[in-house]
Image: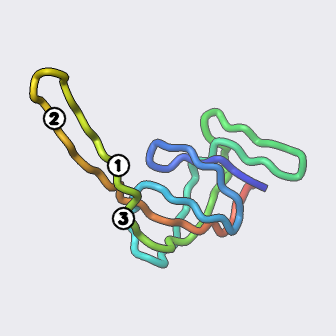
Amino acid sequence: MFAIIVSGSRQYKVEPNSLIEVNRIHLDQGAPFSSDKVLLVSGDGASLVGAPYVEGAKVTGTIVEHLRGEKVIIFKQKRRKNYRRKRGHRQELTRVRIDGIHTN
């Protein structure tokens, strides 16, 4: 069984007991996580597709840890103009363990 959820304007395919990394959620480590923004639920040969969300569907999980992603280098340059800018960015992430997918 799997579901597709929306978190932080991104879509994630989740299964029970899987780990996903989403944009930083302002909850404490070990706190429960739930999302009712479920776009699709599939399992046992049947699928429920929402318009836009599946009614009565919910995905629950637990916050495992807060971390930072890999460093991304942004380098801008204009040739022959002596213009160079180098910046770095590390995205703030939250790792979530999916506990279950619930439907009515």
**Cα separation between marks 3 and 1:** 23 Å
Question: Of the numbered discs in the image, which one, if any, rests on residue 26?
Answer: 3
Question: In the image, is residue 1 above or below residue 97?
Answer: above
Query: In which image quadrant can residue 59 be found?
Result: bottom right
Q: Residue at x 29, y 51 (%)?
A: 89
Q: How many marks overall?
A: 3
Whether the residues at callouts 2 and 1 have beta carbons within 8 Å, the answer is no
Whether the residues at callouts 2 and 3 have beta carbons within 8 Å, the answer is no
Relative horizontal placement of residue 43, taking residue 4 as reference (left or right): right
Residue type, numbered disc 2? Arg
Q: Residue at x 19, y 22 (%)?
A: 79
Q: Position of residue 74 (x, y in %)?
A: 28, 41
Q: Secondary structure at mark 2?
A: strand
Q: Secondary structure at mark 1?
A: strand
N-terminal of the pair, mark 2 or mark 1, is 1
The single residue placed furthest to the top in the displayed view is 80
Relative horizontal placement of residue 1, taking residue 20 as reference (left or right): right
Task: For label 2, count other residues whose C-alpha is less than 10 Å away and answer few (under 14), some (14-19) or many (20+).
Answer: few
**Cα separation between marks 2 and 1:** 17 Å
Residue type, numbered disc 3? His
Residue picked out by circle 2: 84
Question: In the image, is residue 14 above or below residue 99?
Answer: above
Task: For label 3, count other residues whose C-alpha is less than 10 Å away and answer few (under 14), some (14-19) or many (20+).
Answer: few
